[in-house]
Image (cartoon, grey):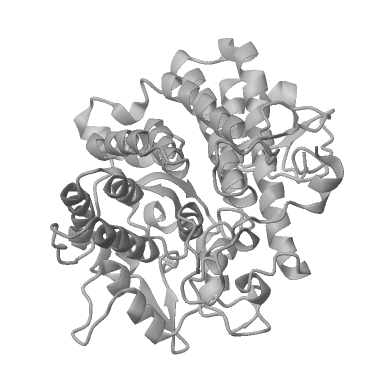
Amino acid sequence: MIMKFKYTPIYITIALGMLNSSCNKWLDVKPKAEVHQEQLFSTATGFKDALYGTYSLMGRNDIYGGEMTMGFMSVISHDYDLTETRSFYYKANLHKYTELDTRGYIDKIWERSYNAISNANNILAQIDGKSSVFGADDYRLVKAEALGIRAYLHFDIFRLFAPAYDAANSKLLVPYITTISKTPTASSPAKQFIDQCFADLNLAETLLADDPINSPDKATNTDMATRRSNHFNIYAVKALKARIYLYIGDKVNALKYADEVINSKKFPLVVNSAVSGPEERIDRTFSSEHVFSLYISDLVNNANMHFRTTDARYLLNNNSTAVKALYEVNSGGSTDYRYVYLWKLYNGTPFCSKFWQLDEAPSNIKYLMPLIRVSELYYIAAECIQDTKAGFNYLNQIREHRGRDPLNNSGTKEELQEEIRKEYRKEFFAEGQTFFYYKRLKITQLPDSNIPGTDNVYVLPKPELETEYGK
């Protein structure tokens, strides 16, 4: 493993239900209260606090609250026009991963991801022996969410720090850590690593058979789906399975699980009234479509730091020509919601306003970072289904809810794949997902650049501590 954690004694800090992680201790000690783990894990509430702390850690700016979404990952996807040499991201934009500025982002992503995995592992190490403190439903939910988080984080580590998937690759790539130990965990080859992801997700799926998101109470079902989207719910499990199956080339199972999420109808596609109207009411992240998202109280501040700042070192912006080309804006303008409602000007420069909100915006749309959108499941289905006409129909369902005209569904397979590629760039701008799309398909040249798509670009270097301590 990357570092030598001090596991004994373990103190878990609870402040407003959130926990923060450190590389020197399993969790930072920044107390309003310090609680020994035996006390924390003596009640169901304590387990839930530990789980909320794991979600909170995932939402930090140096992981999914910033760098794994709108920051570093979107920079290396070439979402932004980065010509300012003073920018902290300038060398990352050139994929100079060994440079000191860039190493800081990469090492922190690795560290925070494994910190969060350690949190999940500690919950899982304790929960079976303390099942008596739970009602049956809470036990299953907490255990399943911890398993889902562990699989989600590990898979992103794999997508970043290992080459594109090859089941025959016997090289030891990255560690899949399921225990808390002072002994470093050995890295796994590709197939073994992915098998471990599926093992966690299969168990989570079993435990979530009665997920409250499927409550039969129709009066509260929509609200329940919204609230469960901030947890690793049963459909997040299925969606992550679809994502992983597509990544490893199993299109049959990818389509199966994508359809299960789509056909659940728990995540309705956004309608115009949700993204138009008063500025403070615009649902910029299309929250009804979130299969799994994080509630991040610092999200607007993180967005302002990148998109509404006069400090060129932090600024991530675009030029009008590039934005119009991305959204295929012609002389008559555009009706695409993602262009009309999610781009603004700051000091005369276009910026993506997806994660920016006015102070008076309601919290249920203001602080959400989507990690899995239902739109991704439509794109997966469109790519995987053998019937090209049906593939275009999946895309057209998204286009209808983005204010766009339908595509002619009599196009070729190649034309369908090109439309999917364009959709990924529009849909997941500033969310970090397009990099993984390029890597999965081994795109030979990254967009808006002359940089070839090789392993030097697609495989991030592991931290030096991993080389020193890991096996």
Does 39 sit above or below residue 94?
Answer: above
Residue 212 percent across, percent down from the top left: 35, 27
User: Which residue appears at 70% of the width and 41% of the height?
Assistant: 115
**Residue 32 location, quadrant:** top right
> Residue 68: in sight, yes or no?
yes
Residue 47 percent across, percent down from the top left: 60, 26
Relative horizontal placement of residue 40, taking residue 448 as reference (left or right): right
For the N terminus, the quadrant is top right
Residue 162 percent across, percent down from the top left: 63, 47
Relative horizontal placement of residue 86, taking residue 303 as reference (left or right): right
**Residue 75 location, quadrant:** bottom right
Relative horizontal placement of residue 31, taking residue 50 as reference (left or right): right
Does 35 sit above or below residue 331?
Answer: above
User: Which residue appears at 54% of the width and 43% of the height?
Assistant: 165
Q: In this orientation, which residue lies closer to the viewer: 185 or 392?
A: 392
Q: In this orientation, which residue lies closer to the viewer: 162 or 144?
A: 162
Q: In this orientation, which residue lies closer to the viewer: 109 or 167?
A: 167
Does 83 sit above or below residue 201?
Answer: below
For the C terminus, the quadrant is top right
> Residue 17: in sight, yes or no?
no
User: Which residue appears at 74% of the width and 40% of the height?
Assistant: 27
